[in-house]
Amino acid sequence: MPHPPIAALRSAFTASAKPGSQDWPTLADFTVFAAAGRTCGRAPLIGLPGWTCDDAARVLALAELATRTPEGDLSAHLRTLYWRGDAHERRAVLRALPYLSVARRDPALATALVEDALRTGDPHLIAAARFADFTSATATVDPD
């Protein structure tokens, strides 16, 4: 399931993350994005094959941050997080695209990130790019 509903992603993350880190995505900011693996763990998510705790933590954090960040700033942050990030961080930015309206409103950014991921040869980034359907309305963030 490439784009589980955000509530299912939250639930699986809460069940799988390191003890004490379940609130990390709502408390995180852009400066701690890289710490998701150390803070929340890298274990597979229970019930969501192909997802790990660090992927979910970063995607949930970006979805939360999107609700309180002006769209232009969010685009700039996504660009920075992707280009300066390691493969895990880049994968999370790609996985977050379907959940963020900025991807639909700034398709040039989303396209550039997907194209770069496809050029890397990294199978994890290629898989994330393959499922980064940022035009999809099925994975939008719900308010709860």
Image (cartoon, grey):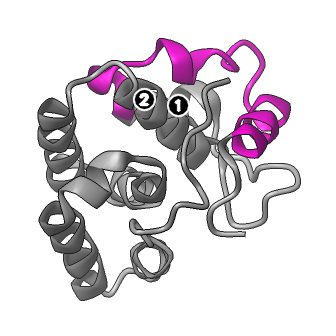
Is 86 placed left or right of 21 in the picture?
left
Q: From the top left corner, tell me how far across and down residue 25 is, in percent.
A: 54, 24
Image height check: is 58 above or below 99?
above
Image height check: is 123 above or below 49?
below
* Residue drawn 86% across the image and 49% down it: 46
Q: Write down the quadrant of residue 51 in the picture.
A: bottom right
Task: Please indicate, yes or no, whether residue 76 appears anywhere in the rendered image.
Answer: yes
Q: Secondary structure at mark 2?
A: helix
Is 70 in the magenta? no
Q: Write down the quadrant of residue 22 in the picture.
A: top right
The amino acid type of the residue labelled 2 equals: Ala
Is 42 placed left or right of 44 in the picture?
left
Residue picked out by circle 1: 38
Say whether marks 1 and 2 touch (CB < 8 Å): yes
Assign the magenta stretch its main secondary structure. Answer: helix
Q: Write down the quadrant of residue 31 in the picture.
A: top left
* Residue drawn 47% across the image and 26% down it: 64
The amino acid type of the residue labelled 1 equals: Arg
- Classify the position of the N terminus by image quarter: bottom right
Task: Please indicate, yes or no, whether residue 37 appears anywhere in the rendered image.
Answer: no
Q: In the image shown, does 18 or 79 lie closer to the viewer? A: 79
Residue picked out by circle 2: 35
Q: From the top left corner, tell me how far across and down residue 9 is, in percent.
A: 71, 44
The residues colored magenta run 7-33
Q: For label 1, count other residues whose C-alpha is less than 10 Å away and answer few (under 14), some (14-19) or many (20+).
A: few
Q: Secondary structure at mark 1?
A: helix
Q: Could you give the CA–CA distance between mark 1 and mark 2, rounded to whole angstroms?
A: 5 Å
